[in-house]
Image (spheres, rainbow, N blue to C red):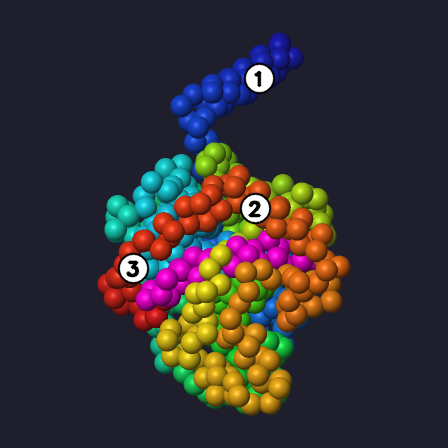
Amino acid sequence: MLARTILMCLALQLVVVLAGVETAAVGSEGPAAAEPRARPGRRPNILFCISDDQSCHDAGAYGSKMVRTPAFDHIAREGILFTNVFTSNPTCAPSRASVLTGQAFYRLEEGASNWGTLDRKFPVFPDMLEKAGYAIGYTGKGWGPGDWAAGGRNRDPAGPAFHKRRCKPPTTGISACDYAGNFADFLKTRKPAQPFYFWYGGLEPHRPYEVGSGLKAGKKLAEAEVPPFLLDAPPVRLDLLDYALEIEWFDTHLARMIKMLEEARELDNTIVIVTSDNGMPFARAKGRSYDAGTHEPFAVRWGSHIKRGRVVTDFVSFTDIAPTLLKAAGLEPLPKMTGKSFLDVLLSGKSGRVDASRDHVIAGRERFYPTLLPYPFRVLRTDQYLYIRNFKPERNPEDLPPGFDPAEAGPSVQYMFSRRHGNAHEQCINKLCLGKLPAEELYNLKNDRWEMRNVANEERLAADKKALAARLEAELKRTGDPRILGGGDVFDSYPTRVFHERTLSGLTEVP
């Protein structure tokens, strides 16, 4: 009798299990298949952290001693440090638009330039996550500079704003936005077990800086790491220390957010990505075609879901971020996205070059300054070469005195411009940073890490240059770049729009 009772119980349990499996199968074939919905708490949370104007080499995990970034280094140690991640465009709004849409910047019409709009016809991944049940939000700088309302949107493309918390910044150049405090407020708004996505957009280390703030905070001029494309002089070193201090402020808020997730026991199930939108706001960096402008810091942590302590050399474009996060959330990227998910790289457990096909990236620029015509270029970056095609070399906004735009009007540029008629070395550096550019540039990175010597006219590299140019042109045609298809003048026609949200939110920044 007892044995019979046990058998009946086991049979009943089996029926319950099979019923659950059948229900799950039916659900996967129904309407939700287009937007898969996992059980609450099983889909990953997403914390996307993006500083404003930081080059790849300026983080401790990459060997910098000038900048102390313990939180970034922590993410890299407990996850993956990427060494070949590049923005699609080395200026703020187009870079962020590529992240949000998963598309190459030149496909986004006005969104290809600073001071335009990002039309609502270009879907953004935060909206897709929200439709799939995610709680979403952002603090600090989302998309911009530009006017998202002009594109038919009712909020920033990064999501609903959380800006209420304020703090006392250490310098006049740093925003009073309490990013971590706003993240805490956001976490309180979500439903129990609801997955979340949050965009932490630090306004640092964007200019202007409080001159001498790095020195005042205890840094020393000898600690400044001066790249060879800048003049090594006290005003430049002082400027670099101010820049470093602002990166460290961004990092302190990142540390607070990580601690919150730990205390809430959410960290293991949260994809944490830390990066920057474009390079440092110094000459020959931000807004320019060289690595100091396009090459970004990038670390990813996802608890036990990815093997920690890895260094990955695969080339990743900012266009790849949206499809990756959508895949991780159980959603399919849109066909119009030009980016390719690197979720397989994250989950592979391997270091070095994981996907052999990830051997290059494409980047470029259209309008940067609101008062000047676009100075368009496109670049192809591989392990060995940086190939640049300048479409309008006759337009050279860089060949202007400092002060014409806040992105370049720092003390270091002022000093360098004052030395443009100095000794041979000073003249050479000024020419690199502020001089006219040719239609083509080629840099051999194997022996020229900082891209100081243009070898585009060297006969021995003619075949390599030709192959790179053909590869760039083919990819631009495949992805529909107006500049290569004969309609590039459309970028000249887009209006300059006023960026209004900074004033509305009370945040202080010059985009």
Q: Visible in this render: residue 98?
A: yes
- Residue at x-position 58% and y-position 85%: 426
Quadrant containing the C terminus is bottom left
Callout 1, which amino acid?
Leu
The stretch of residues the image draws in magenta is 365-390
Badge 2 element: helix
Q: Visible in this render: residue 78?
A: no
Residue 496 circle label: 3
Quadrant containing the N terminus is top right
For disc 2, the marked residue is 473
Callout 2, which amino acid?
Glu
Q: Mark 2 packing: few (<14 Cα in 10 Å), some, or many (20+)?
A: some
Callout 3, which amino acid?
Thr
For disc 1, the marked residue is 14
Badge 1 element: helix
Q: Is residue 124 left or right of residue 440?
A: left
Picture quadrant of residue 82: bottom right
- Choose the circle earlier in sequence order: 1 or 2: 1
Q: Mark 1 packing: few (<14 Cα in 10 Å), some, or many (20+)?
A: few
